[in-house]
Structures are given as structure tokens and as C-alpha cells.
Image (cartoon, coloured by chain):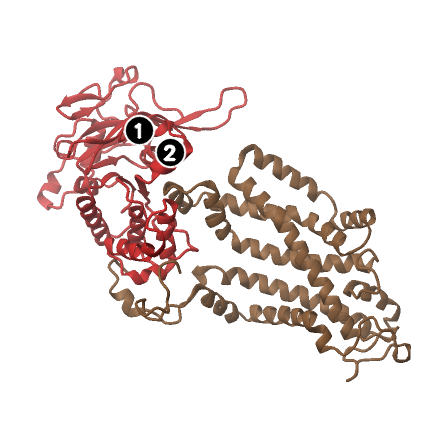
Amino acid sequence: MSDALLLSAEGLTVSFPGRARLFAKRDVVRAVDGVDLKIKRGQTLGLVGESGCGKSTTGYALLRLNKASGRVMFDGVDLMTLPADGLRQMRRRIQIIFQDAAASLDPRMTIGDLISEALDLHKLHTGERRAPRVRELLELVGMPQRFAERYPHELSGGQAQRIAICRALAVEPELIICDEAVSALDVSIQAQILNLLQDLQQRLGLSFLFISHDLSVVRHVSHDVAVMYLGKVVEQAPANLLFENPQHPYTRALLSAVPVPDPDLEKSRERVVLTGDLPNPADPPSGCRFRTRCPVAQAKCAETLPVLHEVEPQHSAACLFV
Amino acid sequence: MATQDASSPAATPATYESGTRMALRQLLRNRAAAIGLFGVLLIVLLAIFAPWIIPYDPTAIALSSKLQPPSFAHWLGTDHFGRDVLARMAYGARVSLTVGLSTVAFAALFGVPIGLLAGYVGGQLDNVLMRLMDAFLTFPPLLLGVAIVGLLGADLTTVTLALGIVQIPVLARVVRSSTLVVREETYITATRALGAGAWRLVSQHILRNILSPLVVQITIVFSAAIVAEASLSFLGLGVQPPTPSWGRDLSEARRFMVDAPWLFMAPTGFIIVSVMAINFMGDSLRDALDPRSWVRRAAPTKETADAPADR
């Protein structure tokens, strides 16, 4: 049970139309380029990478909130080929929460109406069962029920995120995509929300896709971790393997940027500093996409595109030198 | 209040006000709004209760008492046929308000759905619809009014139709541009992810959130329609005599500008006051309808204290 696959994406690709050219074909930006992901039932997959690497786009694609291609099998059903009607039903089982929780709540509706709407959409707990259910849901995320009459702008950041989680839970999903869900919060509030998410995972058997640029947070919550760079997954492993034995130079650079809370260790910490910015995704480097910033890059990196291969059991990386 | 009835004993203590009450209070806090609301109310009541308030028939000719200045018997004087000016203003308000309201209704009936459709669906449909609206806009409004009235004859329905057609693109544009903004909001994505279809997103969320600019534009259309009706009537193309109309009366008052200045001051005053009152009201309605502007009277300090998260 614990290792049963809930969702698996294969060759997930999302392209956006880029700049139009006068005499040439229109540019195509591949924000996500052939990504494979596996999320196990009741577990958390952390998805890390710097801004603009396509991690949020990947999350949206799994919900079909943008135009994606590839295969996404969710509990035996391919989400990508579902007709509109089936998709609406399926959306009940996969939910999403956002970085800006307050912006994800309609400012003109009360909290109670917002939660009620989620129930309405799938005709859950209608009539007399509605009010007690809304109370129950608020309680589940640790909010007093009087908040039902408030408006989103009356909430603080942490409260808004609790309500957003509450609204997602209302439809009884199996998977929740957390898109930088705690990145905008203070550290102490972050911890509260993370604890809430972990608590809910245990109680309700939820799976999470946890998208974040914050490695320490990802390490804390994830069972498995995938590292993305410029639209591709460069390394994927169970959390402990990845953090203790990073293989890909990019992962190493990322990890070396995390400060250690011990002054002695911190002093001796070896840092790999990346120079330059993320290359233009409309015109990615040939061969390995990371080679322009890679400390170990050589000539052959420009010719060969490294594929994800296993370096130890369950641990794979996409680099020619590992 | 989908969750609970505030009056039920099991509910939260009655420290919570309903949205309507907070909106109303917000509206009255604003002085311009209060004045606007008062002005609009005054004219509406005058129009509705004219027969009971004013003891004169606006069309009854009494040549023996013609061109009398304002007095206790005739508050705003009498015109060259001896008709009571206040009575004519009150009954004229009926025409103005009817034309204003039906113009807005007509323009909104077409303009709002067109704007929503163009803004939400986008792409080619947006292009086609908005170019059509642009074509409408190329007509000079008053000229189009004159043409339609000339074609179909002058009565209330044609005047409304003429004015309404001109205002459709105005509303459609405002609705479209606001829709384009709201469509990209995170809460729309979040609600779509919950399983909401296009109809629900548009009717429940987008429409609700474009309300502010829409309300403002509607009041502008309303007052523009009142002015346009007065203009058409002034030119003799609006409501036909003996039906009282502000524009018509103003036109006739020109001949007595020196001898009986109250004759042109009355309709002018009514037009100015109604237009200003409506615009004042529109501006503050926009603010009052936004929950973010609401201030709760009973500041729930204790409640926030035992709320879980931060603050």
C-alpha cells in the first residue's frame, strides 16, 4: 500500500508560444520538456529548482490548467485524454494550493461561501448537512468557525493559507499540489502550516507534490525529491539519498548554498557558486542544458544530451560524469 | 450567509454584521455619496408621487395665470400656458428616469454578455465582437439618435432604443477589459481547479469582481441617457407634447429667457442635479460594494487573539 503509485507522468511537456518572427517560424518556449514524475500514495514528492525552471508549470500541467502534452496516469486513468466532463470529476481528486493564498480566495465571497462553493461544485453534503460540514472542515485546519463569516482580506497570510487548504480538502482529494505554499510566510507560520500539512497527510492519507525553491523545507516534508533545471528533471531520488549523496553538479551547487546552523561546520562548508542566470528557455544550450553554468562541464557536454540514468538503486541523475 | 443564520442561538454572538449593512454604512460615511443618494431619492420620489404631492395637472392650460414668477401657490412659477412648472418638472422626471433606466437596461442586456464573452473566451471571438463594437462607436451618438428617431418616429421606445444602441459598446468595452484582468486572477485558477466550469466562473466570480467598474459605468450611462433624452427633446425629436419633458420645456423657455428666467432655470437645475447626484452615487457605490472597504463595527479583538495562526 505504502509504495503504490498514485500518479505517474511520462514525457510531460508544456510549450508556450514565444516571440513571433517576421520571416521565420514562431519561437516555441518549452517551459517543461519531457518530465517524468512518480507520486506514491500517501507520500510527498518534493520538486525543487530555481525560479523559472518550470516547476510550477509542471504542477499546473498535472491538473491540466495549461496546455500540456505527454501522459499523466492518475490511479489508472490518463488525465491528458479525459473529456471536459471527466476532467471536472477528476479534479475533485487532485487539488492545488498556491503561494499567494489570499489571492486564491475570491475577495467578494465570505470564507463560508467559498468553502460551501467547493462542496456545491461536487454536490457534497447538500442541504442540512452543509453547515456542520463547513464547521468540520474549518476545524480540520484549526480555524474557529466564526471565520466563516469573514472576507479573505480580513485574514493574515497563515490564516489565508489554512482556508485555502480547507477549501482544497472540502472536495476530499487524494493528491494536493502545493505550489510554493509556504514560501510567502514567516518562518514560524511556515512551520505551523507544514505541520498542518503533515498532520493531514497522516490523518487522511494524502499525497503531496511539494513545489518549492526552499531546500530545507523540501527536505523536511518530502519522501522523494526531484530537482528541475530549465524544464528538465536532472536528479531524482528518495529524500535522504539525494540530500546525503547528491550526484548532479546542479544539485550539489544547490545544496552547498544551504547554510548549516553550526558555525564550525559552516566555516568549513564547501561552496559551489554558480555564475550567470538561467539561460533563455526559448533558446536552451545544446547538449546538456546546465553546461553553461556547470563547474565540471567539458566539450562533449555541448554535443550529448545526458539522460536520466540510475546511479544507485532508486537514485537517478542526468549528467555524463556520474 | 450560507453557513449559519446569525440570529440562531447556536451561531456566533451577534457581533457580526451582514455584508449589506456594512456596504450601506460605508456608503453613508461618504459625504458625496450621501448627497448623491439624497438627490436621486428626491427625484425618484417626486416622480413616483407627483400626483399626490403636487395639486396641479402638468398639462392643464390656464392662460389667466400665465408666466407667473415663483410663489407659494406655484413654487417654481408658471409657463406661458399657465401650467405649473413644478408639476411639469415632476412629470418630466418620470420621462427622464424611464428613459434612463430602460436605456441602461437595454445597453446592459447586450453590452454585459458581449463584454464577458469577448473577455473570457478571447481569441477570434474577441476580435470579431470588439470590431463590431468599434463599428457601433464610429456613429456620433446624437446623430445616430436623430437618424433612428427620424426613421421610426419619435416616442419613448424609439428614443430608448436609439440611446441604448449607442451605449452597448461602452458597456461591452468596460466589461471586457475588466474581465481580461479578473480572468487571470489566482482565485479563478483555484476555482477552476476545484472543478468549476466556465459558466460558474463567469456568472459567480468574474461578474462579481467586475461589479465595481460596471456599476460606475452604468451610472455614467444612466446620466448620459438623461442628458441625451433632454437633447433630443430639446430638438423636438424626443417626447412629443403635451407630455412634459425637461428638454422640451427648456427649449420652449428660450423665448422667455428675459421675462421669465425661472422657466429655463427649473429644467436646467433638474438636469444638472439629477446627473450630478447619479454620478456621485456611482462613485461611492463602487467603493461601498467592495468588501475590502468595509469596516466592522464591533472590532473582534478577542476573537483574533484565539485564532490559530499569526497576526
Q: Quadrant of the N terminus of chain A?
A: top left
Q: Which shade is chain A?
A: red
In x, y percent, where is residue B157?
74, 54
> Outermost residue toward the bottom?
B72
Question: CB atoms at circles 1 and 2 under 8 Å apart?
Answer: yes
Which image quadrant is residue B247 in? bottom right
Can residue B221 be seen in this snapshot? Answer: yes
Q: Name the residue tied to disc 1.
A: A77
Callout 2 amino acid: Gly
In this picture, is B243 found above or below A272? below
Residue in front for this viewpoint, B112 or A219: B112
Q: Which shade is chain B?
A: brown
In this picture, is A12 found above or below B302? above
Q: Mark 1 packing: few (<14 Cα in 10 Å), some, or many (20+)?
A: few
Of callouts 1 and 2, which one flags the residue occurring earlier in the amino acid sequence? 1
Callout 1 amino acid: Val
Horizontal side of residue A190 vs A241, given as left or right: right
In this picture, is B102 found above or below B23? above
Query: Could you tell me how many numbered marks the image carries?
Result: 2
Q: Secondary structure at mark 1?
A: strand
Q: Mark 2 packing: few (<14 Cα in 10 Å), some, or many (20+)?
A: few
Residue visible at 55% across and 71% down in the picture: B31
Can residue A31 be seen in this snapshot? Answer: no
Gap between marks 1 and 2 measured at Cα: 10 Å
Horizontal side of residue B218 vs B199, given as left or right: right
In x, y percent, where is residue A50?
29, 36
Which dot marks residue A66? none
Q: Chain of mark 1?
A: A
Which image quadrant is residue B48 in? bottom right
Q: Name the residue tied to disc 2.
A: A86
Q: Quadrant of the C terminus of chain A?
A: top left
In x, y percent, where is residue A110?
39, 57
